[in-house]
Amino acid sequence: EQLAKHVMEDADPEFVNKLNRGDIIIAGETFGSGSSREHAPIALKSAGISAIIAPTIARIFYRNAFNMGLAIFELNETDKIDEGSLIKIDMQNGEISDITANKTYKFTPIPPFMQELIASGGLINYAKSEILKEARQ
């Protein structure tokens, strides 16, 4: 929660004050570059970010985000989505709809296991639920 107060402050000192729970970050190339720890996705998730969409995402950040239960999607057309647009993400079918602009973009769907990580809230929660399933059997 303390880290969440400082999310993206180098890019925009008022970023956190503009956020609403469930907001989506539409970013540029190599989002998360330079972040080799899980603290960045934890802070973003704690700040209320529900997903990040970028043309490319730094690999370590990508994996850490899924492990923390933060959804990440790679989409080349992020420059066509305006700030403030209402966005709908269909993970299973690989579609991002810009409701505001009435446009839909396709991305490669994330694998089912990674969708389970997001639905569980991250790797630790997923592992706990799997252990409980095993114990019940």
Image (spheres, rainbow, N blue to C red):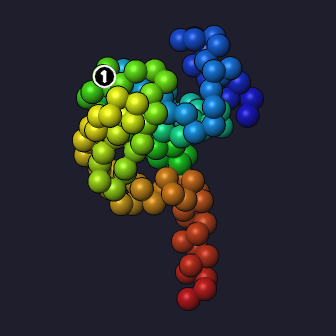
Q: Which residue: 58% across, 39% down?
A: 22
In percent of width and height, residue 100 lies at 40, 30
In the picture, which quadrant includes the N terminus? Answer: top right
Amino acid marked by disc 1:
Lys
Q: Is residue 3 visible?
A: yes
Q: Residues within 10 Å of mark 1 (few under 14, many from 20)?
A: few
Residue 15 found in image quarter = top right
Q: Residue furthest bottom?
A: 137
Count of numbered circles in the view = 1
Q: Position of residue 125 (x, y in %)?
A: 60, 59
Q: Is residue 33 visible?
A: no
Picture quadrant of residue 130: bottom right
Q: Position of residue 27 (x, y in %)?
A: 41, 23
What residue lies at 34% left-to-right and 40% top-to-bottom?
A: 96
Q: Secondary structure at mark 1?
A: helix
Q: How far across and down, in percent of the image, does residue 45 sit?
A: 60, 38
Q: Residue at x 58, y 73 (%)?
A: 131
Q: Would you name the residue on which mark 1 appears?
A: 80
Left or right, 91 with respect to 17, comes to left
Q: Quadrant of the C terminus?
A: bottom right
The residue lying toward the viewer, choosing from 29 and 132, is: 29
Residue under the image location 58 percent in, 69 percent down: 129
Vertical relation: 57 (above or below) 113: above
Q: Is residue 121 left or right of residue 95?
A: right
- What is the residue that sits farthest to the right in this orientation? 2
Q: Is residue 39 left or right of residue 62?
A: right
**Observer-nearest residue: 94 or 111?**
94
